[in-house]
Image (tube, rainbow, N blue to C red):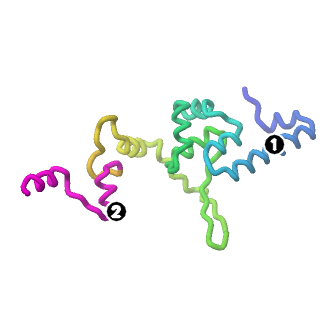
Amino acid sequence: MAKKLKDLMAELSAEDRRDVRQRARLHIRAMEDAERLDQIRKAADRNQSEVARLMGIGQNAVSQLEKRDDLQLSTLHRYVTSLGLRLELAVVSASGERAVLRNYQPWRGMGTAAGKAVRAAQQVAPGKKAPAGTASDPQKAVASKGAIRPPRSATRKAAKNR
């Protein structure tokens, strides 16, 4: 059976315990200053292969994930958990007061049937077009910017009639 950290620390000398705590503080500071996921991973002393194994994905997928600018909270939660960390959300007021949202964990529902259905609906099979009206539909993206375009078939018919 694996030993608990508390038990391992108890076996160390006082000087070794201080060293461990000091190194842990350095890792935490490095994470606080991180601007990218790979910096957090490196501060946690993990490599992409370890993270991939723990997330159940390939190393290449971790590499791509670390390059993304926009992540779903559920993905970020899985990534952080694979590093042995816990994800917390917080809001900060204009005056600098900070409130940790302890009970707001939207990634919890992503393991449910509803969450799986949402993820399945967001994915488009290779070589297929996204269903009309979905977030993946390029027409919807254009329409949301105020530039509603008619379907191509209507445009072609209008061009033929000219």
Q: Classify 10 Å Cα crowding around label 2: few (below 14), some (14-19), many (20 and above).
A: few
Magenta span has 160? yes
Q: Classify 10 Å Cα crowding around label 1: few (below 14), some (14-19), many (20 and above).
A: few
Q: Amino acid at mark 2?
A: Lys
Label 1 SS:
helix
**In screen coordinates, is 92 left or right of 113?**
right
Residue for badge 1: 23
Q: Which residues are magenta?
A: 136-162
**In which quadrant of the rendered image does the C terminus lie?**
bottom left
Q: Residue at x 65, y 39 (%)?
A: 83
Q: Residue at the left extreme?
A: 161
Magenta span has 57? no
Nearer to the camera, 132 or 4: 132
Residue for badge 2: 145
| Location of residue 16 in the rendering, given as x and y in whole percent from the top left corner | 89, 37
**Is any part of residue 73 visible from this angle?**
no
